Amino acid sequence: MTDSTTGAVTAAAPAFYTTAELARAAGVTRRTVMHYAELGLLAPDQVTASGRSLYGPYALRLLRDVMDMRALGMTLEEARDMVTLRRATHAVDGTYRRDWTRADVPLSDERLDALHARLRAIHGAYERQADNLARFDRWLTKRFTGALASEPEAPGDGADHTE
């Protein structure tokens, strides 16, 4: 497949992923995919006659979302609520559904309030720490890979953080 804007040749995403292919694409183990499926975080789009689970491209997006949520410190229950919310508000191909209503979301108001409070807390912490995270990333990249050696420190930083 050729990208019409850049002319670069790109590989087309498969129509369906096996459990192993989905795991490989997301950078997790096959067992992680199976565990998340058992918990209801992922659902196969098709099951073959022999019982093999097949996942569509949107499952890869959901799996990556779950991994990101876990990296942000969300529990599996919170991640499940987020996946439930996304499934209620998005079509199976991942596009946002403008016609969704509150009745489409099978979560109680209490669960949604708790999820909203948790998301605001995570977002607030990230906003407060964004500059520090970027600075530490630059410092670690410079210190351990030698990259960015000619790049100046962050604006207003002035201090040498290499020692």
Image: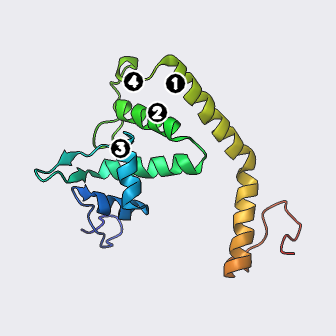
Q: CA distance from mark 1 to mark 2?
A: 8 Å
Q: CA distance from mark 1 to mark 4?
A: 9 Å
Provide the secondary structure element on which disc 1 rests: helix
Q: Which mark is residue 55?
A: none
Dot placed on the residue nearer the N-terminal end, 1 or 4: 4
Are there few (<14), some (14-19), or many (20+) residues within 10 Å of tag 4? some
Q: Amino acid at mark 2?
A: Asp
Q: Amino acid at mark 4?
A: Val
- Judged by depth in the image, the label closer to the viewer, 2 or 4, is 2
Provide the secondary structure element on which disc 4 rests: loop
Which residue in the structure is indicated by mark 4?
105
Q: CA distance from mark 3 to mark 2?
A: 15 Å
On the rendered structure, is 51 left or right of 24? left
Q: Amino acid at mark 1?
A: Leu
Q: CA distance from mark 2 to mark 4?
A: 10 Å
Q: Amino acid at mark 3?
A: Glu
Which residue in the structure is indicated by mark 3?
38
On the rendered structure, is 50 left or right of 116? left
Q: Position of residue 148 (x, y in %)?
A: 69, 76
- Of 112 and 49, the residue lying toward us: 49
Q: CA distance from mark 3 to mark 4?
A: 21 Å
Q: Are marks 1 and 2 in contact (CB under 8 Å)?
A: yes
| Residue under the point 24% across and 68% down | 1
Which residue in the structure is indicated by mark 2?
81
Q: Which mark is residue 112?
A: 1
| Residue under the point 41% across and 61% down | 29
Dot placed on the residue nearer the N-terminal end, 2 or 4: 2
How many marks are shown on the rendered structure?
Answer: 4
Q: Are marks 1 and 4 in contact (CB under 8 Å)?
A: yes
